[in-house]
Amino acid sequence: MKSELILKKGHELRALLDSGEVSSVEVTQAFLDRIDAVDGKINAFLTVTADLALEQAAAADKRIKEGHASPLTGIPVGLKDLLVTKGVRTTCASKILENFIPPYDGTVVAKLREAGAVFTGKLNMDEFAMGSSNENSAFGAVKNPWDLDRVPGGSSGGSAASVAALEVPIALGSDTGGSIREPASFCGIVGVKPTYGRVSRYGLIAFASSLDQIGPMTRDVKDAALVLDGICGHDPKDSTSVLKESTDFAGALSSGIRGVRIGVPKEYFVEGLDPEIERAVKGAISKLEELGAEVKEVSLPHTEYAVAVYYLLATAEASSNLARFDSVRYTTRVDGSDLIDTYKKTRAAGFGEEVKRRIMLGTYALSAGYYDAYYRRAQRVRTLIARDFDEAFKEVDVICSPTVASVAFKHGDKTSDPLEMYLSDIFTIPLNLAGLPGLSMPCGFSSDGMPIGLQMMAGPFREEVLLKTAYAFEEATDFSRVPGL
Ligand code: GLN
């Protein structure tokens, strides 16, 4: 029984916990044992909080016995290491925050804590969430559980790999330009990026504030819906969080997709797309049609500008956000001859190469002589990209595409060419620029056995139709598998 527990999804564990068949302490211990056994190979965890987890599990068991469990009570959850956790080291996978112990919980962490979730640890990522392969972590790359020579995707690579490797049933990631969906695709799991404003960003260490959103990474759609129900909602501490009533995405999953209108964007099925991916995604769209959806082609004509726009806006925001790591607060300080010298030495030693590249790009884009040519123009094109989606979503409910144009690539394949790495985000970035919800879920495997991801996108605050479409597809197919580790 004990080793079988790690195969269970969150909602399956819920049933076992509520019936009293197992305790949260047993469940938690099973996952901690799994972390011990496999994380040496995967490197998904930066910090394992075994004592805290077992303490929370014991409290959860008490709460379950008393009969007031909520859906996540007693269920282990892993947190991407940019979510601020009270008393638990939070590094952003950066040397500059190597010893940062936050004095408070971010809102999402606090919500999960109140719900009785069990925190087993903090997950590896690209430094400050900048990257698509998890090779930019100051604490070592993460390995893809399907093939240890390959990357798990990024920046939430530790979150995706830990879920795929059964180290944790549920993880949280963040998505600024694809960082939940791309690693979910590479590791064969489900990842949801909510509508901008749906989930509070308070206590999420900021990369690009107008794009960042926290979301669930899970082994199936039902768990994703349950977690989303648990973390979304208005938060006065985040002025961009929206006033919406509480949600019941999990309750609405099985209402069926008859009449749901599916759009296929022609700009996403172009040269360079791996034919195996095209086949799998088109197969998934046919399956949705069989299930009662209506399929039609749509156009998102400004897609080709998205990567350029994103890498101007995201770097501009990052250059400003990361100014706070000034050697006076939070950071691991390197003393210099005076204050300016201390800033310089601390930042030179503390930030990795990619983070420095982005700070420089962003500072340049915002500099007086170039602001109009770069930053302002990028903002205008961002509006055009958002309008493309507005138009398309007048005609359809959900847009389906590949999540990424390839399966997970090998470690080192793209590290020498940052531009090639940036271009791999072409299908995920437009959604962030438009602030819309989207997800990735498995829809097939390549001939060499790597998972292929299907992306679904929806209009603002239409997570319900997104999740029920994904659920219908998942129920009718069998692509959610476990790698043989
Ligand atoms: N890969 C993108 C980047 O490097 C997206 C990162 C993210 O979503 N955090 O910026």
Image (cartoon, rainbow, N blue to C red):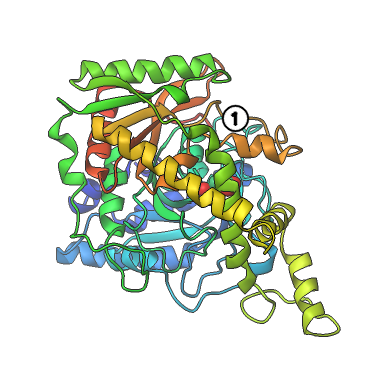
Expressed as whole percent of the image width and height from the top left, the position of residue 170 reads: 39, 48
Task: Using the image as rendered, state which of residue 343 and residue 154 is in the foreground.
Answer: 343
Residue sitting farthest toward the bottom:
338
Q: Number of callouts in the render?
A: 1
Amino acid tagged 1: Asp
View extreme (right): residue: 337
Q: Secondary structure at mark 1?
A: loop
In which quadrant will I find the C terminus?
A: top right
Judged left or right of residue 164, residue 199 is: left
Q: Position of residue 98 (x, y in %)?
A: 65, 67
Q: Quadrant of residue 192?
A: top left
Q: Would you say residue 327 is visible in this rendering?
A: yes
Instruction: State the residue position of label 1.
Output: 147
Q: Residue at x 66, y 30 (%)?
A: 410
Q: Is residue 481 above or below residue 363?
A: above
Q: Position of residue 55 (x, y in %)?
A: 39, 68
The image shows residue 372 at horizontal and vertical percentages of 60, 56
98 sits left or right of 317 in the view: right
What crowding class fits label 1: few (fewer than 14 Cα within 10 Å), some (14-19), or many (20 or more)? some
Q: Looking at the image, is 48 positioned above or below residue 407?
A: below
Locate residue 151 relative to residue 255 in the image: left or right.
right
The quadrant of the picture occupied by the N terminus is top left
Residue drawn at (69%, 56%), measured in percent from left and top?
A: 138
